Image (cartoon, rainbow, N blue to C red):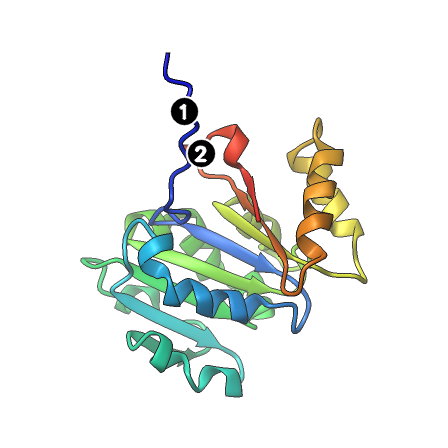
Amino acid sequence: MNNTWFVDPFIFKHPFTCTNAGPTQSGKTWLLKRGLVYNNDLFDTQPKNITYCYSAWQTSFDNFNEISPDVKFHKGIPDIDELDNSEPNLIILDDLMKECEEDPCIQKLFTIDSHHKNISVFFITQNIFSKGKFTRTLNLNSHYLILFNNPRDRLQIGTLARQMFPNKVKFFMEAFEDAASKPHGYLLIDLKQSTEERNRIQT
């Protein structure tokens, strides 16, 4: 019997939806930049068109094109129907919490369009349990959750642990505390159907 433990090197399986949650300056944009730099190693399918959607321009965006020349910036929510779905697309929704959580088009993007229109999505938010109209739908339809350290609100992490891993709450919280103890530390939860149970939590 072959007992080799094989871990797929490609973390993100296109098409996917991913929610990145953490307070300001926790490392969300930093991690995203690193993901674009090393996308050949992290994505099983390389995005050909990358659309970075924002609410207000930030100086941290200035060197994005040096990191990934394919990045196109768009203020506000994009028109999904304008994307070329013959090629793999990546949409990044940054600092658009209110717009995304109230817009039925984003709900449709997470539930239908991502799979049918060749689109992967990173949704960057400060609070995974915010009170938006479609917040719960976005969370339930995220294939990946990336949780950053939030010293002011451990309650939401505990709530998530009890919802997702009711029999492994202690293990989950210990894994999060260990990851969060490092600068820009994070915990990645892989909810893809194809993922083995032992690989669902990564740092």
Asked whether residue 57 is in view, the answer is no
Q: Whole-percent x and y of residue 40?
A: 31, 58
The residue nearer to you, when weighing 70 against 130, is 70
Q: Could you tell which of marks 2 and 1 lies nearer the N-terminus?
A: 1
* Callout in the foreground (2, 1): 1
What residue is at 41 percent from the left and 55 percent from the top? Answer: 109
Which residue type carries mark 1?
Answer: Thr
**Callout 2 environment at 10 Å: few (<14), some (14 to 19), or many (20+)?**
few
Label 2 to label 1: alpha-carbon separation: 16 Å
Residue 19 vs residue 151: left or right? left
Q: Whole-percent x and y of residue 46?
A: 28, 58
Q: Whole-percent x and y of residue 25?
A: 65, 73
What residue is at 37 percent from the left and 76 percent from the top? Answer: 67
Instruction: Using the rendered view, name the quadrant where residue 24 is placed.
Output: bottom right
Q: Whole-percent x and y of residue 2?
A: 37, 17
Residue under pointer 1: 4
Which residue type carries mark 2?
Answer: Thr
As drawn, which residue projects farthest toward the left? 86
Instruction: Using the rendered view, name the quadrant where residue 97 is placed.
Output: bottom right
Asked whether residue 28 is in view, the answer is yes
What residue is at 57 percent from the left and 66 percent from the top? Answer: 28
**Callout 1 environment at 10 Å: few (<14), some (14 to 19), or many (20+)?**
few
**Mark 2 secondary-structure assignment:** loop
The residue nearer to you, when weighing 178 against 192, is 178
**Mark 1 secondary-structure assignment:** loop
Q: In the picture, which quadrant includes the N terminus?
A: top left
Q: Which mark is residue 60?
A: none
The residue nearer to you, when weighing 163 against 40, is 40
| Labels 2 & 1 near each other (Cβ < 8 A) | no
Residue under pointer 2: 195
